[in-house]
Image (spheres, rainbow, N blue to C red):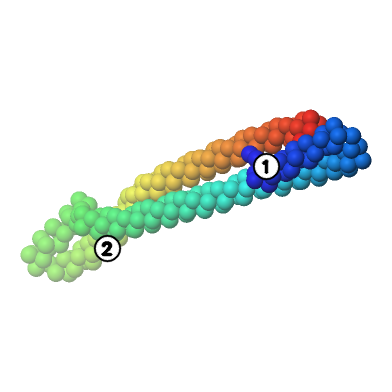
């Protein structure tokens, strides 16, 4: 695009060229020589000025592309950092919510187990001894009844302790199974979160590659345009201003 300065210089060069031709036609060769030298001097100066202006403008264009790319890259990282930060926050909230729910469910499960406990079922031997104890007491044979009672009490205490241990072991096993099930749920959630995290990371890499490819395309296109402009400038210089 021709500027006002370019137009003014071209007009002046044309006037000077007309002056040279007039001097040549009128035989004023000294003045024609002066005009010719002045023309060559001005053309060289104009050529250098245009080249320098083109270099400055092309440099500004390249710097503009670089600056635009850096701003876009910074915004890209800010957006993705925010997006991934929000994802991590949401993931942590999901994990904490599940842990709290599991904690409450475990408490309810333990309470249900305790409520469902039945009274111990004593052995036939103990029940028979108790009947004998009662029969001896009714017969007023308190000495033998007392002996049988001591034996029954000892056997009952042993069976009761055995029953408690068995029930406790059953509760531990059921509780361990419950915890294992809930741990499986938590691991499944964490696996889904990790899968989402990896998908986000992959998407970020793809988006970054597209951003860089756009930058490379713009940069290459600009370089091609500037090379053509330099070639046209050289041709125009060789052909005269």
Q: Position of residue 31 (x, y in %)?
A: 88, 41
- In this view, the residue farthest toward the front is 26
**Label 1 element class:** helix
Q: Is residue 227 left or right of residue 116?
A: right
Is residue 40 at all visible to an observer of this figure? no
Q: In which quadrant of the rendered image does the C terminus lie?
A: top right
Q: Nearer the viewer, mark 2 or mark 1?
A: 1
Task: Describe residue 117's horizontal placement relative to residue 61 as left or right.
Answer: left
What residue is at 31 percent from the left and 55 percent from the top? Answer: 101
**Vertical placement of residue 82 versus 43, above or below:** below
Residue 202's place in the image compared with 130, above or below, is above
Residue at left offset 20%, top offset 63%: 148
Residue at figure coordinates x 50%, y 49% from the top left? 80
Q: Quarter-wise, where is residue 155 in the image?
A: bottom left
Residue 127 position within the rendered picture, expressed as x and y whole percent measured from the top left: 17, 55
- Residues 104 and 114: in front is 104
Q: Quadrant of the N terminus?
A: top right
Q: Residues within 10 Å of mark 2 (few under 14, many from 20)?
A: few
Q: Is residue 104 above or below residue 198?
A: below
Q: Indicate which disc residue 157 carries.
A: 2
In-image side of 66 versus 192 (left or right): right
Q: Is residue 175 left or right of residue 124?
A: right
On residue 7, the disc is 1
Residue at 40% from the left image edge and 49% from the top image edge: 186
Q: CA distance from mark 2 to mark 1?
A: 119 Å
Q: Is residue 100 visible?
A: yes
Kindly indicate whether the residue at mark 1 contacts the one at mark 2 (C-beta within 8 angstroms): no
Disc 2 or 1, which lies upstream in sequence?
1
User: What crowding class fits label 1: few (fewer than 14 Cα within 10 Å), some (14-19), or many (20 or more)?
Assistant: few
| Residue placed furthest toward the left | 138
Q: Nearer the viewer, residue 77 or 176?
A: 77
């Amino acid at each position: 695009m021709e500027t006002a300065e370019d137009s003014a210089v071209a007009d002046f060069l044309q006037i000077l060229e007309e002056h040279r031709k007039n001097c040549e036609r009128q035989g004023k060769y000294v003045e024609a020589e002066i005009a010719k030298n002045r023309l060559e001097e001005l053309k060289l100066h104009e050529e250098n000025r245009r080249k320098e202006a083109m270099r400055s403008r092309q440099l500004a264009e390249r710097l503009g592309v670089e600056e635009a790319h850096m701003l876009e890259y910074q915004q890209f990282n800010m957006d993705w950092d925010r997006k991934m930060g929000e994802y991590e926050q949401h993931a942590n909230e999901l994990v904490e919510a599940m842990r709290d729910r599991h904690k409450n469910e475990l408490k309810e499960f333990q309470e249900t187990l305790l409520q469902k406990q039945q009274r111990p079922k004593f052995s036939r031997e103990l029940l028979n001894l108790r009947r004998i104890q009662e029969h001896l007491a009714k017969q007023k044979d308190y000495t033998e009844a007392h002996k049988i009672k001591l034996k029954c009490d000892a056997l009952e205490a042993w069976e009761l302790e055995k029953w408690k241990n068995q029930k406790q072991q059953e509760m531990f096993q059921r509780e361990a199974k419950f915890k294992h099930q809930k741990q499986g749920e938590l691991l499944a959630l964490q696996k889904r979160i990790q899968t989402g995290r990896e998908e986000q990371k992959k998407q970020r890499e793809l988006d970054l590659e597209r951003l860089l490819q756009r930058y490379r395309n713009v940069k290459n296109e600009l370089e091609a345009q500037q090379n053509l402009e330099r070639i046209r400038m050289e041709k125009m210089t060789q052909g005269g201003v």
